[in-house]
Image (cartoon, rainbow, N blue to C red):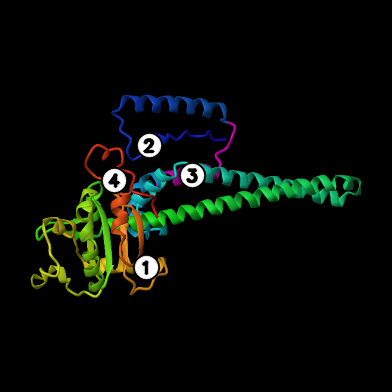
């Protein structure tokens, strides 16, 4: 009978460097231990599966790098890749124990299912053996407990998973909003993400007449809004020119430096803005023709939204100033997130 020939796993690694002393020492120790095992088991024949496994390991080791490249280049992205990694990280930060709860729910479901299978086998045995009929009430009780536990924890898991998907979708929409670009002046264009921690944006989306009227209504609250870091982003859905931008309407729409600063932002890439706003209207079951406003927190998350004119007076009353004694303490007091 042929003795088993030891195969060193180090020879299968394409990244093995014999110049490293630690690796060389481990290799020699492995060979010596393999020789002892081979001499002590010399009565056994070589099984064909050993040859197959060694060839398989060799092929995997030699083609490992190429297979990784092929997978990353050819495979299509999974549906979960549509959600950005930033949104997933933010979801974990906002709900840090959700993954732990979902793990235990799955463990309890598996435990209840296993207990139910064992109880079913006992039930079948009791039904087949008349001498065990007295155990039927207890077995049925155990089975109902197991099934009840499975259904209960499945319900909790499904609810937790649905809440997770809703939160991820909301964060993903916020991340999509943060990538939309704004024009600050003729030379500077920035994404909304760059204004996080700097300004509280109020986005107005509607026909030009709606934005012109909102401009008039905000006049009395201009100074209070600027003190609270509010900047307005007017987006005319009918693509008409805003009257307060026209030189001929200065008397009807008086503009000073504070008013210019409050209304200085303009959307860039109108098609992307229009698509994002239409998507939000569809999700909120709002007519596409309805004028809407969207209020963002200092951290870029959606604070409030609605149909019609924005409540300028409520913004001044609810939002804390960005400067002053309480500015650092009240930075997060932007209201609850929708």
- Give the residue at x 36% y 46%: 62
- Residue 123 is one of the magenta-drawn residues: no
Marker disc for residue 281: 1
Marker disc for residue 11: 2
Residue 92 is situated, as x and y percent measured from the top left of the image, at 41, 45
Q: Quadrant of residue 8?
A: top left
- Give the residue at x 37% y 39%: 13
Residue 217 is situated, as x and y percent measured from the top left of the image, at 24, 64
Q: Are marks 1 and 4 in contact (CB under 8 Å)?
A: no
Furthest toward the right, the residue is 131
On screen, residue 255 above or below 130: below
Neighbours of disc 4 within 10 Å: few (<14), some (14-19), many (20+): many
- Residue 45 is one of the magenta-drawn residues: yes
Q: Secondary structure at mark 1?
A: helix
Instruction: Find the distance from the CA under tag 1 to the CA under tag 4.
Output: 29 Å
- Viewer-side label of 4, 3: 4
Q: Secondary structure at mark 4?
A: loop
- Mark 1 and mark 2 lie on one chain; the one further toward the N terminus is 2
Q: Is residue 142 visible?
A: yes
Instruction: Find the distance from the CA under tag 1 to the CA under tag 2.
Output: 62 Å
Q: Secondary structure at mark 3?
A: helix
Q: Secondary structure at mark 2?
A: helix
- Give the residue at x 74% y 50%: 144
Marker disc for residue 99: 3
- Mark 1 and mark 3 lie on one chain; the one further toward the N terminus is 3
Magenta residues span 43-59
Q: Are marks 1 and 2 in contact (CB under 8 Å)?
A: no
Marker disc for residue 112: none
User: As rendered, which of 314 and 328 lies closer to the eye?
Assistant: 314
């Amino acid at each position: 009978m042929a003795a088993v020939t030891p195969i060193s796993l180090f020879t299968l690694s394409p990244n093995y460097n014999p110049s490293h002393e630690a690796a060389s020492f481990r290799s020699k120790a492995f060979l010596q231990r393999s020789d002892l095992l081979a001499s002590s088991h010399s009565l056994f024949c070589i099984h064909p599966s050993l040859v197959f496994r060694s060839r398989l390991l060799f092929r995997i080791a030699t083609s490992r790098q190429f297979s990784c490249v092929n997978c990353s280049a050819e495979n299509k992205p999974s549906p979960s890749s549509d959600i950005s990694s930033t949104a997933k990280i933010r979801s974990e930060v906002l709900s840090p124990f959700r993954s732990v709860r979902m793990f235990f729910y799955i463990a309890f479901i598996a435990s209840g299912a296993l207990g139910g299978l064992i109880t079913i086998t006992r039930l079948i045995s009791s039904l087949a053996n008349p001498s065990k009929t007295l155990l039927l009430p207890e077995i049925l009780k155990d089975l109902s407990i197991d099934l009840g536990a499975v259904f209960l924890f499945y319900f909790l898991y499904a609810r937790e998973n649905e809440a997770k998907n809703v939160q991820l979708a909301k964060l993903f929409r916020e991340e999509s909003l943060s990538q939309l670009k704004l024009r600050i002046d003729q030379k500077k264009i920035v994404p909304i993400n760059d204004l996080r921690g700097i300004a509280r944006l109020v986005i107005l989306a509607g026909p030009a007449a709606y934005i012109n009227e909102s401009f008039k209504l905000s006049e009395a609250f201009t100074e209070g809004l600027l003190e609270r870091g509010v900047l307005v982003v007017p987006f005319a859905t009918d693509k008409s020119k805003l009257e307060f931008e026209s030189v001929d309407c200065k008397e009807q729409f008086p503009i000073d430096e504070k008013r210019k600063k409050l209304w200085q932002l303009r959307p860039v890439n109108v098609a992307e803005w229009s698509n994002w706003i239409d998507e939000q209207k569809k999700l909120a079951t709002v007519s596409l023709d309805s004028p809407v406003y969207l209020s963002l927190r200092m951290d870029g998350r959606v604070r409030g939204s609605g149909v019609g004119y924005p409540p300028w007076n409520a913004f001044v009353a609810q939002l804390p100033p960005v400067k002053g004694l309480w500015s650092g303490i009240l930075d997060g007091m932007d209201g609850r997130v929708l």
